[in-house]
Image: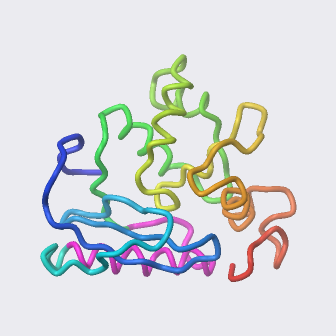
Amino acid sequence: MDGDRTMPTTEPLASGTIATPIGDLTVVASGRGVREVRWGRRPGAGDAAAGAEGVAHVEQAIRELGEYFRGERPSFGVALDLRGTEFQHQVWDELARIPRGETRTHGELARAVGRPSAARAVGAATGRNPAPVIVPCHRVVGANGALTGFAGGLEAKRALLAHEGALPGGGGEGEGRLPGF
């Protein structure tokens, strides 16, 4: 996750939208990589001022998201240009390391980033993840294994985890999955 991590930018950004089984997702990218994945359909798709690189990152992210939702992609390779603090980036990097079909708690993530007493801060950083699904914050569960907050809603989180085989009864053909998976 390269680039200036915290400075606001006025640079032109490209965007595009993909319809998914959990709703529309809009991908926003700079010339360096994906900046955000937003819930819903957003105007401004394909801003020509963003340049070929920004448009290429949007197109790659949309292609990879389609592959993910079809069960063809276990992880994402698109470049990222996320904005956040150094600590947030540490948490987001650790989120990206959670394998498909597995979950982690905030406490486990806190230990993984070397801050074992910072589970609440990890939870806050997880909640500020600007690129859900691509940076799989849906793979974080409560200390007791319960599903906890998710920007797309708990039903979307449950569907993503079932799609990945991380929930009992999920991962089997048609079990625990939304139509289209």
x 50%, y 69%: residue: 40
In-image side of 144 versus 91 (left or right): right
Query: Looking at this rendering, what residue extends furthest in the front direction?
Result: 43
Relative image position of residue 15 (x, y in whole percent): 31, 73
Q: Position of residue 119 (x, y in %)?
A: 56, 25
Q: Residue at horizontal 60%, vertical 33%?
A: 106
Q: Magenta segment: does it hold 65? A: yes
Front-most of 14 and 34? 14
Which residue is pictured at 79% across the width and 56% down the height? 167
Q: Mainly helix, strand or loop, the magenta region?
A: helix
Q: Quadrant of the C terminus?
A: bottom right
Observer-nearest residue: 37 or 94? 37
**Colouring used for the render:** rainbow
Residue in view at x 27 percent, y 64 percent: 33
Quadrant in the rendering for residue 89: top left
Residue that extends furthest to the top in the rendered view of this protein: 117
Residue 108 colored in magenta in the image: no
Magenta part of the chain: 54-77
Above or below, 16 relative to 85: below
- How many labels were placed on the picture? 0
How far across and how far down the image is residue 153, in percent?
A: 65, 55
Q: Is residue 35 above or below residue 77?
A: above
Q: Quadrant of residue 49?
A: bottom left
Task: Decide: is 167 above or below 159.
Answer: above
Horizontal relation, residue 76 to residue 140: left or right: left
How far across and how far down the image is residue 104, in percent? 64, 41
Horizontal side of residue 84 vs 147, given as left or right = left
- The image shows residue 178, relative to residue 30, as above or below, that is below
